[in-house]
Amino acid sequence: MANDEEQAGTPVDEDALAAEWAAMAGGDDESESGAEAATDGVDGEGAAGEGAEGEDGDALAGQAGRALSQDEIDSLLGFDAVDSQTGSQTGIRSIINSSLVSYGRLPMLEIVFDRLVRLLSTSMRNFTSDNVEVTLDNITSIRFGEYLNSIPLPAILAVFRAEQWDNYGLLTVESNLIYSIVDVLLGGRKGTTPMRIEGRPYTTIERNLVERMVHVVLKDMKTAFDPLTPVDFNFDRLEVNPRFATIARDANAAILVRLRVDMEDRGGRIELVLPYATIEPVRELLLQMFMGEKFGRDTIWESHLATELWATEVQIDAVLDEQMMDLGDVMNFKVGQTIMLNCTPDSPIDLKCGGMPMLRGRMGRMGNTVAVKVEKSLMKAKQEGGKE
């Protein structure tokens, strides 16, 4: 310690200091505290009186010798920062997730699934002969890979195909609903919690009963989409491993619809996943605010537009003759030069609007004004395929 106090006021050799740190790294706590006092350049009393500063120096020295973890890097970059007022993600996370299309841009989709909830409530009551309530929890956008990793296992995943859209969808039935459906269909008593046996695969009876329920849901989905567009949802297969139910790339965006099925004191959740690639053929229909928006007619606007069009003034050019000439001849035109037109008083004259031939007629005179008598509509002849 005496040597440390003598060297505290003199310049310290960096190589010697580095060697001293390396030697002290394998020592006990007392040698570490002595190294802190030497590196901080304070005397023994200062080291004893400023223990907090010594601990900070030790932490900084430890951080300087190690690499930052991924969580620390994300924190420094604001990767997982969340706005305390709005609760929305900020920073790099929001930039990455900006590619996800919000279902709010597809207002018709919510109307379709509201219709599905009403249909499914009736169908599930008929299917189970019990008092069933189906509610729509939420509709969100999610990446398909993130959804597969978030599925609580065990669960049964049903893959179905939308025939007219030529793509697939996914329907997930949680374990609580599976045991509840089996208990209800096989005559379980009301007011008792279904017995769950963890760690075993689903039996053939359980899979068959869940498959029957999936057929009921798909049939109601078809009915819910019918007012918008005809589509058939056909059952494809059942899976218990999410990786075997992959119907899209992990990075692809998808619509996630969570439905809650309550049968008095038991029930569970059904989740529908429709990748955006699946609903792309009907995207324009889902953008509507109400049924038939794209095909609705506004008679007031049509009448106003027709009135304004009939009152619009346009310029009509009467073309006596057209000639093809070289650019050199045109550049050599002089004032007073005469150009002979290949037309006679009886030659037909074309009437053009904006360079488009509209009418054809004969030139004449009405009073003191040169006039053209219309004899033929060139637009009508062109539509009928006639020759001019």
Image: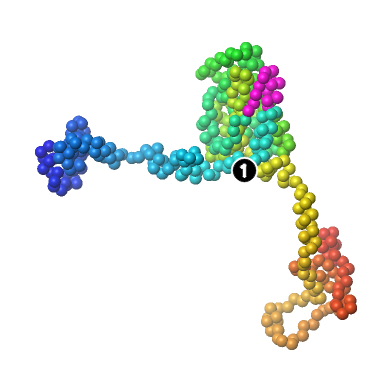
Q: What residue type is labelled 1?
A: Arg
Q: Split into 4 quadrants, where in the image is the C terminus?
A: bottom right
- The answer to whether 329 appears left or right of 196 in the picture is right
* Residue 132 covered by magenta stretch: yes
- Is residue 246 among what the camera can see? yes
In magenta segment, residue 269: no
Left or right of 40? Residue 2 is: left
Say which residue appears at 70% left-offset and 41% top-offset. Answer: 290
Q: Which colour scheme is used?
A: rainbow
Q: What element carries label 1?
A: helix
Q: Residue 227: percent from the left, percent from the top?
A: 73, 37
Task: Classify residue 130 as left or right of residue 242.
Answer: right
Q: Give the range drawn in magenta.
A: 120-135
Judge from the rendering whether residue 383 lies leftward or rightward of residue 164; answer left or right: right
The reply to whether residue 211 is in sight is no
Q: How many numbered tags mark residues here?
A: 1
Looking at the picture, how far across and down is residue 109, in whole percent? 65, 38
Q: Which residue lies furthest to the bottom in this view?
A: 336
Residue position for label 1 = 105
Q: Residue 229's image quarter?
A: top right
| Point 41% across, 41% down: residue | 74
Q: Residue 213 location in percent, x, y?
A: 66, 23
The single residue placed furthest to the front in the displayed view is 85
Q: Residue at x 65, y 29 (%)?
A: 236
Q: Residue at x 70, y 35 (%)?
A: 225
Q: In which quarter of the image is residue 283?
A: top right
Quarter of the N terminus within the rendering: top left
User: Who is closer to the viewer here, 4 or 118?
Assistant: 118
Q: Dot 1, how many residues are within 10 Å of its Cα: few (below 14), some (14-19), or many (20+)? A: few
